[in-house]
Amino acid sequence: MKKKLVLLGIVSLTILGCQQNNKKLNLKEVNTIITNGIIVTVDSASSLYPDGAIAIDGDKIVAIGTSAEINNKYQSQNVIDAKGKIVMPGMVNCHTHLSMTLFRGLADDLQLQDWLTKYIFPAEADFMNEEAVELGSQLAMIEMIHSGTTTFNDMYFYEDKVAQVAKKIGMRGVVSESLIDFPVPNSKNSDEGIAYIRKMVEKYKNDSLITVGLAVHSPYTCGPELIKKAKKVATELKLNFHMHIAETKWEVDTIYKLYKMTPVEYLDKLGVLDNKTIAAHGVWLTDKDIKVFAERGVSVAHNPECNMKLSSGAAPITKMLSMNCNVGLGTDGVASNNNLNMFEELHTMALLAKLSTGNPTSIPAETAIRIATINGAKLLGKQKEIGSLEVGKKADIIIINAVKPNTTPLYNVYSALVYAVSGNDVTDVMINGKFVMRNSALLNINEEEVMQKVRVKARLIAKKLKEKNPEHIFVNLLDSLQ
């Protein structure tokens, strides 16, 4: 009898095991499952999952739900336990000049025109080449990934080199070669610049990470013929048209003296404003200007920290949003910020909006998150691909440690993200379905090697700057960092 019971027990366990195996076989295999996290989707319903999971296969999100729902339908060899962490879409940096990381702290506390003409333009002429752009963009992407940015919109020179760096690191980017009415590091004139852009368009056609754009610097550095010519090329090639617009009062006054119009009225008369136009800054906009932007579908890339540092002003983004003008968030370049930390930018944006309007309800935390994610995706024409966590969209995801002193206690996840979380709290970053950072370590580039190369380059820049501007207060601490 005892032997029969033992045999019966063995048979029962075998049947149970088979049933469990059969159940497991019925689960769909996916590349990655992120489970047990606080999922902030930023979808149209602002769906939240306090104990949620995401299934990722290839480069796309295939399912989002509670951990129980996802784990009962999917299995993976790569399961990420996000207990105590916030999972959200990656940040979209809508306006920056990545390679200018080489000029971080080089010329601070200056008026914009002095900053540009006495320091930045000369430094670019002396030092910006393919090697410098590669190095500067490497450092920039390292910084951006560490602080949760998954997509950037760059405006600079040698943008093919920026694209190559992004491909190597695994970052999503819009690379906009900049045109201007004087020779720049990689083109003697605008025709050479346009030829360069055409080659890039062909090279990165249908690329999974890289999108090519076209940029003109501003209405005061580019004449009307160049602006119209550039827009015609952008329209022909179906490219975003990226431009500094109404950044300073000086710009507004200068354009008015020349054309008796605001910069927006002037550009609208030239016929270059439409839903592919990205207006960087938009600080000095009239109500009429904002209405034109809204009617034409122009998006504004808001850069609050740069605008504050250069004393350009506070962009009226509360009014823009109320008038149905799309607003995304950017850092600008580090030469005028001085960092690429989108969480810091997010925090500053929300506070500046409240201060400048005198209204503490201006730009609520949830709205701020949307500006930094899905609005930025819309600005780039990529809202169907990125900017929110939804089935069918690209898996551009960041994971944030929420069990830290600065996030304790956690009452409201949006409040925590905007007012408490630091970029240093980001632990993991996935772009296009692949992790580019795990446990705060970048996977596809050697950070220490890049920083050492930047220090070597910075010595040369500092020496040249001192020769040209001996009166400039410049303390070189580079040697102490060896």
Image (cartoon, rainbow, N blue to C red):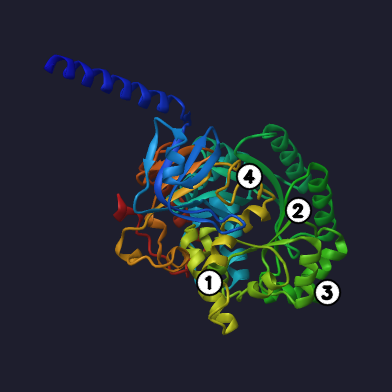
Q: Check contact, mark 4 vs mark 3: CB within 8 A.
A: no
Res 360 seen here: yes
Q: State the image coordinates of residue 126 (x, y, percent, origin top left).
A: 57, 51
Residue toward you, 31 or 480? 31
Numbered-mark total: 4
Name which of mark 3 and mark 2 comes first in the sequence.
Answer: 3
Q: Secondary structure at mark 3?
A: loop
Pointer 2 local density, CA inside 10 Å: few below 14, some 14–19, many at least 20: many
Single out the mark in the foreground, 3 or 2: 2
Under tag 4, what secondary structure?
loop
Residue labelled with disc 4:
385
Residue 85 placement, left or right of 363: left
Q: Tell me the distance, in whole angstroms, between the alpha carbons under discs 3 and 1.
A: 31 Å
Q: Is residue 4 above or below residue 477?
A: above
**Foreground pick, 63 / 406:** 63
Query: On the rendered structure, is 80 left or right of 126?
Result: left
Residue 350: image tag: 1
* First of labels 1, 4 by sequence position: 1
Q: Amino acid at mark 1?
A: Ala
Which residue is tagged 2?
A: 276
Instruction: Identify the residue at image location x=48%, y=31%.
Output: 30
Label 4 and label 2: CA atoms lie apart by: 17 Å
Q: Nearer the viewer, mark 2 or mark 1?
A: 1
Label 3 sits on residue: 261
Q: Nearer the viewer, mark 4 or mark 2?
A: 4
